[in-house]
Amino acid sequence: MIEIYLLEQLCAFEECATLSRAAQMLHISQPALTHSMQKLEEQMGVSLFERTKNRITLNENGKLTAQYARRILAMENDMIERVQLFDKSQRTITLGSCAPVPISDITPLLTTLFPQRRIAFEIRNHDEELLEGLYKGNYQLVVLHEPPQDSAVFSFAYRTEQIFLMVPKQHPLAVHDSVSLQQLDGQNLLLYTKIGFWYEMCKERMPHTHFLMINEMDAFDEVTEIAAFPSFSSDAVLTPDSRTYHNQKRVMIDDPCAAATYYCCCMKKDHSYYHPLFHRLHSFRK
Amino acid sequence: MIEIYLLEQLCAFEECATLSRAAQMLHISQPALTHSMQKLEEQMGVSLFERTKNRITLNENGKLTAQYARRILAMENDMIERVQLFDKSQRTITLGSCAPVPISDITPLLTTLFPQRRIAFEIRNHDEELLEGLYKGNYQLVVLHEPPQDSAVFSFAYRTEQIFLMVPKQHPLAVHDSVSLQQLDGQNLLLYTKIGFWYEMCKERMPHTHFLMINEMDAFDEVTEIAAFPSFSSDAVLTPDSRTYHNQKRVMIDDPCAAATYYCCCMKKDHSYYHPLFHRLHSFRK
DNA sequence: ATGAATTACGAGAGGCGTAACTATT
DNA sequence: AATAGTTACGCCTCTCGTAATTCAT
């Protein structure tokens, strides 16, 4: 049987077009590569190269072999990646979410319901990334803001979130009780960075707005307090304590897209395993 | 990167269920296998086995790995096979035919039209085998008795063949000028073995007939001369010389399936290359 | 003169075998 | 006693590196 390293070297040679450059790329000597290619040729049982005194190139057989080789190498990498993911998925539950609120909803439930398994989580801006991760095994659970179409995926709309604006009382916008996103476009706005799909929504609906991104949640609370800029909050976030926001006015946002429904999803085959979780998620519905 | 031999050994282990038996099957010692499996486990980065003092079995990771490994090994074999076929197809033209007549029609044309390439041929009983071989590259040209459906295949109906019966004059059937295959069913018939789809047709239409199969063409001519059994001939076969068959009567066969149309085919992408052949084949049409 | 390929030869890694040991049936 | 797996150790193959050679730009 032909070993993998020969196929790797062949592909490197095809990329680099000369043995010397390929050897450099592979961190081996050039004579070693010569030998390998001779061996490969012998083991394939057909000629793979066009040789002149000072030049060696792939012939048609060689090009075809390299094509197949690439697919085999890709399959091997895929195997390793998938088995490692599978192994990890057996010991840890990874939750992928399109927004931060579901993380704080669901993570505590997971730790109590599945104490023997490690819990991890990630925020992603796009539902598609999350679904792909669910299929590949990167995530065992994902929370989307659109219902998934695939019949292999179980989903449960477990809660909604409505965002609104916190506006400093002296700010011009503070005269309104409600505004549209279009009205906000062009303003300076404070935004916490890790808000998942909300960020994409803001970019799309308010393309002219300058967002002041803040990384730390603690800093965010402090800055909103002091700064003269409006910031977002939501009905899902508990105001840290009554002291905060004494100088801020709550302004509603008219747009329908200021409200989101969260769909907690798993692969259907895993539904019974995660049933306890979905059961508990019922309590989030009013 | 993980080498192929480790994957082979893993698959062997999965088949054999014990290291000792797998080692035996692989023609290596059992400690060597132990080592390999330890190495594979290490390179995969996850545990693959459930170990007790005296027993080692694949765990879920291991089973998954073996599954992928099988696919990778299959791909490698496929690569070798296909490249070798490709190489061969570049230097020889292999003609696959459903009957002997097209072979003697086409082979001489090929040798004159493509003198730089070796010519090989094969007879196959089923059109499907031929088409499959055409796709895979086993054949560059095939002759079918049904027009191919695939739009990637070019076909040209270049001639017909009509079979009839040669009957010894003292034989009861010799009173007829024409018979149906159904009438023949149950008779003893002489048949040359290498007649491709005709054989399948005979089996189907005359399930109760005893066929006396003869391997050698020379022998066939002699036996038909002497034997008291009817035999097939066709309008495409030239009677060797007038001496032959002086004691035989020609009896027509009514059934439509006693006539065949031959479709000479190649992949469409190769059509221009084989154009000279198809051009010459026009002369076979009346 | 520089760079590319091959050949020759030697070093070192690693696959594999033998032997010895432990545990299970 | 027989069978299964692991550990230890040494051989030998095979991969790779260095050096030298040939040829082309």
Image (tube, coloured by chain):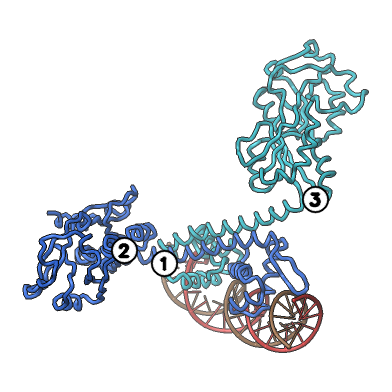
Chain colours: A blue, B cyan, C brown, D red
Nearer the camera: disc 3 or disc 2 = 2
Q: Residues within 10 Å of mark 2 (few under 14, many from 20)?
A: some
Q: Is residue B51 left or right of residue B168?
A: left
What secondary structure is found at the residue carrying circle 3?
A: loop
Residue drawn 32% across the image and 58% down it: A127
Q: Amino acid at mark 1?
A: Gln
Q: CA distance from mark 1 to mark 2?
A: 25 Å
Quadrant where the C terminus of chain A sits is bottom left
Q: Is residue A42 left or right of residue A109?
A: right
Residue drawn 76% across the image and 14% down it: B178
Farthest-out residue, right: B243
| Residue A232 x, y percent position in the rendering | 18, 67
Marks 3 & 2 on one chain = no
Q: Are marks 1 and 2 in contact (CB under 8 Å)?
A: no
Quadrant assignment, res A26: bottom right
Q: Nearer the viewer, residue D4 or B101?
A: B101
Chain letter of mark 2 equals A
- Residue B204 shows up from this direction: yes
Q: CA distance from mark 1 to mark 3?
A: 51 Å
Q: What residue did someone put label 2 on?
A: A125
Residue drawn 14% across the image and 56% down it: A283
Quadrant where the N terminus of chain A sits is bottom right
Residue B117 marker: 3
Q: Amino acid at mark 2?
A: Asn
Q: What residue did someone put label 1 on?
A: A84
Q: Nearer the viewer, residue B132 or A259?
A: A259
User: Compared with residue B87, is residue B93 higher up or lower down, i.e. above or below?
Assistant: above
What secondary structure is found at the residue carrying circle 2?
A: loop
User: Compared with residue B285, is residue A279 higher up or lower down, i.e. above or below?
Assistant: below
